[in-house]
Image: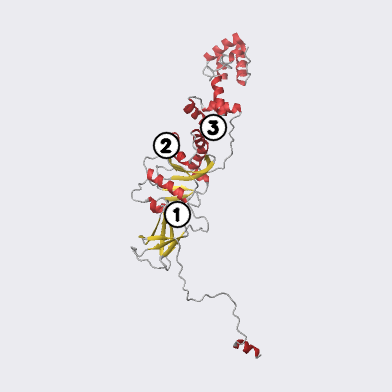
Amino acid sequence: MRIIPMTKKYIKQAEILEQLKRKEISQQVASISLSLSRRQIRRKLKRFLKQGIESLVHGNKGKMSGRRISLDIRHKIIDLMKNKYEGFGPTFAAEKMLELERININAETLRLWLINEGLWHKKRKRKQHRRWRKPKDLFGEMAQLDGSPHIWFDGQEWTLLRFVDDATREILWMEFVPSESYKSIASATIKYFLKHGMPLSLYTDRGKVFKVNVNNEENEFITQYQRALSQLGVKLIHAYSPQAKGRVERGFQTDQDRLVKELKLASITNIDDANRFLQEYYIPKMNSKFTIPASKRGNLHRKTDKYNLDDIFCIQAKRIVQNDWVVRYNSRFFQIEDSRPAIVKPKDQVTVHERLNGTIFISIRSNILEFKEIKERMQNVNKSEKIYTNRIYKPKVDHPWRIYRSCY
């Protein structure tokens, strides 16, 4: 005999059918009260008269589903989640099981199993209210850039640089670098520009690579990165909160969960293999899952054919030519040659360019100067000159100054 759960629904139906059985109400009134048709009322009354209150419960109530996953497969999945896929979320774990184990399990079903086993618990935090910004209309109208330092693989911290299109959420470029330095960011930017072209604007935070933050209230000083983008006609926009560039920030939340596990499953332990994995597998896969169409058709990326990106993204520094035609830069000395294409005089200001690969060239008024690096700067010392010291001069005993003082 089945145990009948006496819910409000069954209690109400039983009361109405009892009244109908005693002919206290009509079928029409019972139909209106239970929101059922008169045909359904007659069917329920017929079963109620034969079986009583048990007839109100559906026949499949309490029975196992015919499509239920077998206990053996369930135990196998739980065992995989405790060992191979430890720490994986239900959605990602379901994807990897289908891909690697050939086990097709619904993510919601897996989530409920993990909750019952005590393997999954997601905390919900109340977030600060913020105003939503509409995505850009066209592909290439704005790209968001950010870096995420994290222990991605091999127990060592690396920084993952990520360029994301604001209109489509497409990952434009991703790369692991040692740190969020100018050379790393500039190198990744060049690779992105060569692959897709230059966007109309670039949205970043206010890190030291992107903005001069100290003693720069009027924004008169700019960074090397700002200068390079301005030469290319790319507008650099600074965000004033992490939430403002949420489209790239939320991507890092996914990466720190999925990408770490993907790298672990692929047994990747060095940065070269990790970057190759990003380009060949991870970026295409993520773009196929999460990219959305832009609201308008078109591409605002511009080609880079007219620009030498290596020269534009080099580090530029102003220096003064000394009297011996030597220029000093980062504790290195460069002697300007006589066969120079432009007139250079001492005290002139020249520009030292250091490319990302470390090569140096010097220019003045858009002219490239010839020079050679010298190991040690020569010191011009005239030996005939007297060398004065701080020794206190004491006059002799018969000095007139002493004689003059003795008269008083």
Mark 2 or 3 closer to N-term? 3
Q: Position of residue 344 (x, y in %)?
A: 37, 66
Residue drawn at (40%, 50%), measured in percent from left and top?
Answer: 234
Q: Is residue 228 visible?
A: yes
Q: Position of residue 257 (x, y in %)?
A: 52, 36
Q: Nearer the viewer, mark 2 or mark 1?
A: 2
Q: Is residue 24 visible?
A: no
Residue that mark 1 sits on: 224
Quick check: 79 above or below 135? above
Quadrant of res 12 = top right
Residue that mark 3 sits on: 89
Local SS, label 3: loop
Q: Amino acid at mark 2?
A: Glu
Q: Return the residue found at the far top.
A: 50
Q: Evaluate if marks 3 and 1 touch, with contact meaning CB atoms under 8 Å apart.
A: no
Quick check: 355 above or below 322? above
Q: Amino acid at mark 3?
A: Gly
Q: Which residue is at the front of the view, 357 or 386? A: 386
Q: Position of residue 321 (x, y in %)?
A: 42, 65
Q: Evaluate if marks 2 and 3 touch, with contact meaning CB atoms under 8 Å apart.
A: no
Quadrant of res 368 = bottom left
